[in-house]
């Protein structure tokens, strides 16, 4: 069975979705979801350990057709790092999210909700594992369509979820269609869709207008998916009006998977020496800086906490883009480190927000006034997540900022390094606003009294402990990230 | 539309042939243009034509919405299940060759089963979409009918 | 101006034309249903790109006839497009379902009216 782990980690959530519909029971739906994500996490963790030990990629041929005739899954150091992250966060959010889901989603929609939930998770895992460019598109759309439906489920609480989901649908579909156009152009050039094959054939025949156009389309489509400035306007409404569990899952995983896909296509297929890659790098660098500032500044002015942290996500994705734009092994490693850390930090933050939302409804600066005394553990998780976002030492956020700035200094990009530091410090402003509201104000007499239950903080604290662990004992993560970056860049460094 | 004799008679005559053609396209995917998706859409067209001409109540009576939802899930399970069966009988996922005594027989059977799954899901999705949109019910009321049917069934079972 | 390469590759001209019509409709029209139609046209242009790419001069339909000397068109783009068509149908379905819900909630499917309804609601909420 373990030999089939690469496909089982995706098929188990994928088949859990129709199974949940067939079972038609609300309680069974949650149990099946938890079981499926747990199995997925175990398989992906096992694969990570295997690849880390041997250093050799694991190849799995679907239908026993070898590449490039068939679709193969290749688990190398890069996706072996991302897959357990996605599966693990999916497992934790599913486990603790039940209370949030019951509070915010109508009871009759629960079976279909969990079905769409499993489809999103399966789609994300499939995007990461596969080695076929069109297969990435298929899983991308599976994940995205379920995500649009999940975001729209927030309409029970706030009707603005519906236009937000519609906007997300339009922009997400445009991004995916651009990606398909790019893949079509690549297929026209090389006659193959297998990523390894494309990487082998492109250097000789790629230096044409068609290759340049393919790079442009693929890059643009994926820029939209990673919410790179100025294509980021869909993210804030979608994450803030979705149900809290959905925000937690998507903020922690969806954009990270798109970052991985962008890395795989840009560096694993086109490679550093492809004509036009320098321009793409410059774009990533400067749009990343712009996004970092746009996100942080917008977050400072927000009073709704979910919107605030959604804007903050845009800034963090900007840092990942900067890491990619550096076009070096160190930069790419920094992106991978930040990818893992941001998933953990944002997951913790949104889970804590979900816990609070179960009681106060809309989580704003005024509705959480003085909540620090009534829900100490939950707000502490929020606080640690915020500190990690700033990059305080002893948290994982510090490690990712450190390696990012180091990679920037390696290339003597002092201005960009300075801008990175400034925007990180600016994040202090909105974290301070939250601390002040939660701890230093008195809870108004007519506000909802919160009785803290473990369901509110357990999931968030698991992720916070992981953040602190990777902040203190960073070597395992840093080594894995550097291995991932080197695998991605291959021989052309 | 149900009071127009021409449309009524013609659709009553044609609907079985549409379904038959859908099945033909489904099973001849190996030898000509066809396969699961095309067949599913044609097959669903018969049910949709029935519902348009004779009214939504008659249409929902033929294929209840609750059953439509189960069929969607069943088709996906059929596809994934075929892959899992080949995984469990010694091959890799979706390796059809191990499903039959010879490689060609296995491939035939495998493709047949997965296309059947695809056709079932696609037909159910098309019909389900039509029922959801054309009755101009919101999802909540669609599921209300689903749940009301269930409640009345359980009440009748108890009585 | 030398138009003959453009005319020789008229399929790509058609694809780009459809693509831009669809894309413009998505961006420039405020009616949500028109946006969905534009999205559909945009996706259809991509289908045309793939399928026209697969055609080989003198190639016939890619169905095995047993004759070893037939030239077939490339069947792989057909399969890719089948998948993409299904994705397009699903996207359209989700989109229209959202439009129906938006219509029931806000009473309109014009983007600017929805935004003003949301802003009016927001102002009301913040004031209370």
Image: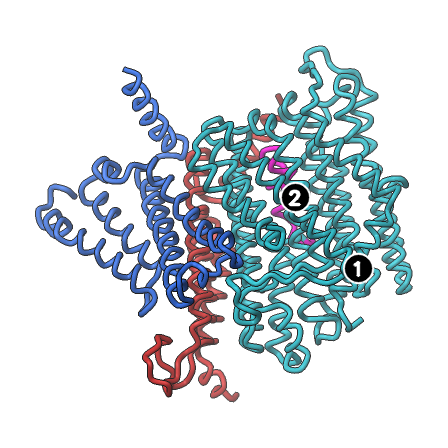
Chain colours: A cyan, B blue, C red
Q: Is residue A239 magenta?
A: yes
Sequence-first disc among 2 and 1: 2
A374 lies above or below A246:
above
Q: Which residue is mark 2?
A: A41
Cα distance between the residues tagged 2 and 1: 21 Å
Q: Label 1 marks which chain's residue? A: A
B124 lies above or below B106:
above
Q: Residue at x 41, y 54 (%)?
A: C89
| Secondary element at tag 2 | helix
On-image quarter of the C terminus of chain A: bottom right
* Foreground: disc 2 or disc 1: 2
Q: Label 2 marks which chain's residue? A: A
Magenta residues span: A228-249
- The image quadrant that residue A489 belongs to is bottom right
Q: Position of residue A388 (x, y in %)?
A: 82, 39
Which is more toward the observer, C11 or A149? A149
Which is more toward the observer, A116 or A85? A85
Q: Is residue A220 visible?
A: no
Q: Which residue is mark 1?
A: A483
Label 2 packing within 10 angstroms: few (<14), some (14-19), many (20+): many
Q: Residue at x 62, y 56 (%)?
A: A129
Which is more toward the observer, A97 or C29? A97
- The image quadrant that residue A327 belongs to is bottom right
Q: Position of residue B105 (x, y in %)?
A: 37, 65
Q: Residue furthest left?
A: B5
Q: Is residue C17 left or right of residue A264?
A: left
A440 lies above or below B137:
above
Q: Position of residue C95 (x, y in %)?
A: 45, 47
The answer to whether marks 2 and 1 sit on the same chain is yes
Q: Residue at x 77, y 19 (%)?
A: A370
Q: Are marks 2 and 1 in contact (CB under 8 Å)?
A: no
């Amino acid at each position: 069975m373990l030999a089939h782990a690469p496909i089982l980690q995706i098929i188990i959530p994928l088949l859990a979705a129709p199974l949940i519909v067939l079972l038609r029971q609300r309680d069974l739906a949650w149990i099946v979801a938890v079981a499926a994500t747990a199995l997925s996490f175990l398989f992906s963790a096992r694969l990570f350990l295997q690849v880390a030990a041997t250093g050799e990629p694991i190849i799995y041929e679907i239908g026993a057709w070898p590449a490039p005739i068939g679709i193969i899954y290749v688990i190398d150091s890069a996706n072996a790092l991302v897959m357990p992250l996605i599966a693990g966060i999916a497992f934790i959010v599913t486990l603790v999210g039940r209370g949030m889901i019951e509070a915010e989603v109508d009871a009759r929609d629960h079976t279909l909700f969990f079905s769409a939930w499993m489809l999103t998770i399966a789609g994300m895992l499939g995007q990461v594992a596969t080695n076929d460019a069109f297969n990435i598109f298929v899983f991308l759309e599976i994940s995205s369509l379920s995500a649009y439906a999940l975001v729209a489920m927030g309409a029970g609480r706030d009707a603005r979820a519906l236009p937000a989901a519609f906007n997300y649908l339009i922009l997400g579909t445009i991004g995916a269609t651009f990606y398909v156009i790019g893949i079509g152009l690549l297929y026209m050039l090389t006659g193959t869709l297998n990523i390894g094959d494309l990487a082998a054939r492109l250097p000789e025949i790629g230096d044409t207008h068609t290759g340049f156009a393919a790079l442009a389309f693929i890059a643009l489509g994926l820029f939209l998916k990673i919410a790179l400035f100025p294509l980021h306007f869909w993210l804030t409404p979608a994450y803030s009006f979705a149900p809290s569990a959905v925000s937690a899952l998507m903020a922690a995983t969806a954009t990270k998977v798109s970052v991985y896909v962008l890395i795989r296509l840009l560096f694993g297929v086109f490679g550093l020496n492809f004509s036009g890659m320098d321009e793409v790098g410059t774009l990533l660098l400067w749009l990343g800086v712009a996004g970092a500032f746009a996100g942080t500044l917008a977050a400072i002015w927000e009073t709704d906490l979910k919107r605030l942290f959604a804007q903050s996500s845009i800034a963090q994705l900007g840092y990942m883009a900067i890491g990619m734009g550096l076009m070096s092994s160190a930069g790419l490693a920094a992106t991978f480190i930040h990818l893992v850390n941001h998933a953990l930090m944002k997951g913790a933050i949104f889970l804590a927000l979900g816990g609070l939302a179960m009681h106060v409804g809309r989580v704003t600066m005024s509705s959480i006034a003085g909540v620090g005394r009534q829900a100490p553990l939950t707000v502490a998780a929020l606080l640690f997540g915020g500190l990690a976002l700033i990059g305080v030492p002893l948290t994982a956020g510090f490690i990712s900022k450190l390696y990012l700035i180091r990679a920037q200094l390696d290339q003597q990009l002092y201005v960009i390094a300075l801008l990175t530091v400034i925007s990180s410090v600016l994040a202090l402003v909105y974290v301070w606003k939250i601390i002040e509201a939660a701890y230093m104000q008195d809870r108004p007499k007519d506000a909802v009294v919160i009785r803290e239950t473990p369901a509110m903080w357990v999931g968030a604290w698991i992720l916070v402990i992981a953040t602190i662990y990777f902040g203190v004992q960073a070597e395992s993560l840093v080594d894995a990230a550097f291995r991932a970056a080197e695998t991605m860049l291959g021989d052309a460094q | 539309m149900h009071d127009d004799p021409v449309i009524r008679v013609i659709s009553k005559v044609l609907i079985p042939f549409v379904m038959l053609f859908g099945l033909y396209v489904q099973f001849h995917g190996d030898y000509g243009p066809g396969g699961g998706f095309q067949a599913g859409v044609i097959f669903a067209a018969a049910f949709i034509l029935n519902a348009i001409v004779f009214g939504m109540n008659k249409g929902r009576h033929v294929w209840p919405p609750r059953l439509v939802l189960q069929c969607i899930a069943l088709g996906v399970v059929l596809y994934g299940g075929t892959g899992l069966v080949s995984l469990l009988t010694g091959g890799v996922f979706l390796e059809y060759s191990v499903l039959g005594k010879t490689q060609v027989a296995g491939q035939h059977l495998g493709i047949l089963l997965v296309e059947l799954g695809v056709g079932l899901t696609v037909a159910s999705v098309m019909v389900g979409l039509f029922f959801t949109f054309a009755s101009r019910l919101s999802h909540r009321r669609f599921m209300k009918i689903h749940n009301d049917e269930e409640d009345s069934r359980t009440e009748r079972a108890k009585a | 101006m030398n138009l003959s390469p453009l005319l020789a590759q008229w399929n790509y001209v058609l694809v780009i034309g459809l693509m831009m019509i669809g894309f413009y409709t998505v961006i420039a029209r405020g009616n949500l249903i028109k946006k969905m139609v534009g999205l559909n046209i945009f996706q259809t242009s991509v289908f045309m790109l793939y399928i026209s790419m697969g055609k080989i001069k003198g190639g016939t339909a890619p169905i095995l006839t047993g004759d070893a000397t037939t030239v077939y068109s490339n069947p792989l783009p057909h399969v890719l497009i089948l998948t993409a068509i299904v994705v397009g149908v699903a996207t359209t379905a989700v989109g229209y379902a959202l439009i129906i819900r938006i219509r029931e909630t806000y009473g309109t499917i014009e983007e600017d009216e929805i935004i003003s309804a949301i802003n009016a609601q927001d102002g009301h909420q913040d004031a209370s």
